[in-house]
Image: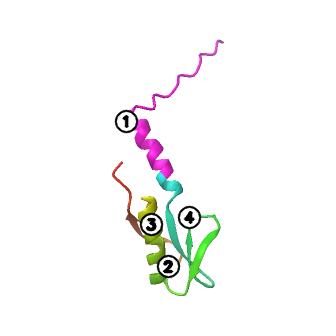
Amino acid sequence: MTKEPLKRRNLENPQIKSYVRAIEKGKNSQHVMPTSCGWAVKKVIGSKVVYTFNTQKKAIGYAKDIALNSKSDLFIHGKDGKIRERRSYSEQL
């Protein structure tokens, strides 16, 4: 069995460019999630809490500003923790 060398990705390929942008956008997504202390703003699920607010409305406003500046998505979770709304502030892929 002979091994063929791996082909290099053509970074000018529109599909690859779109995929890379989608991955980067996902890393910057903001999540507004319920906690025992109120509503938390997190960069991605499982990461450290950025800030905690008394109301969901205040948390959404803060997260929206971050999402607008980073041109990413905002995921708003309900009291049950499930995503109830997604807002996209990114450029079209």
At which x and y percent is residue 36? 63, 84
Query: Where is residue 92 drawn, in percent x and y?
Result: 33, 51
Q: Position of residue 17 (x, y in %)?
A: 42, 39
**Mark-to-mark CA distance, 3 and 4:** 9 Å
Residue assigned mark 4:
43
Q: Earlier in the sequence, mark 1 or mark 2?
A: 1
Up the image or down, 33 lies above or below 25; here it is below
Residue plotted at (52% across, 25% down): 8
Magenta residues, start to end: 1-24
Q: Residue at x 41, y 31 (%)?
A: 12
**Callout 4: 10 Å neighbours few (<14), some, many (20+)?**
many
Q: Which of the numbered marks, if any, corresponds to residue 74?
A: 3
Residue 62 marker: none
Tag shown at residue 14: 1
Most distant residue in the front direction: 69
41 left or right of 64? Answer: right
Percent position of residue 78, x then y: 48, 77
Rounded to the nearest angstrom, the CA distance separating label 1 from label 2 is 36 Å
Residue at figure coordinates x 51%, y 81% from the top left: 79
71 magenta-colored: no
Q: Mark 2 highlights which residue? A: 59
Q: Earlier in the sequence, mark 1 or mark 4?
A: 1
Q: Is 21 within the magenta?
A: yes
Q: Looking at numbered disc 1 in the image, what kind of residue is underneath it?
A: Pro
- Element on which disc 4 rests: loop
Q: Residue flagged by tag 3: what amino acid is it?
A: Leu
Classed neighbour count for the residue bearing mark 2: other residues with Cα under 10 Å, few (<14), some (14–19), many (≥20): many
Q: Earlier in the sequence, mark 3 or mark 4?
A: 4
Q: CA distance from mark 1 to mark 3?
A: 25 Å
Q: Quadrant of residue 85?
A: bottom left
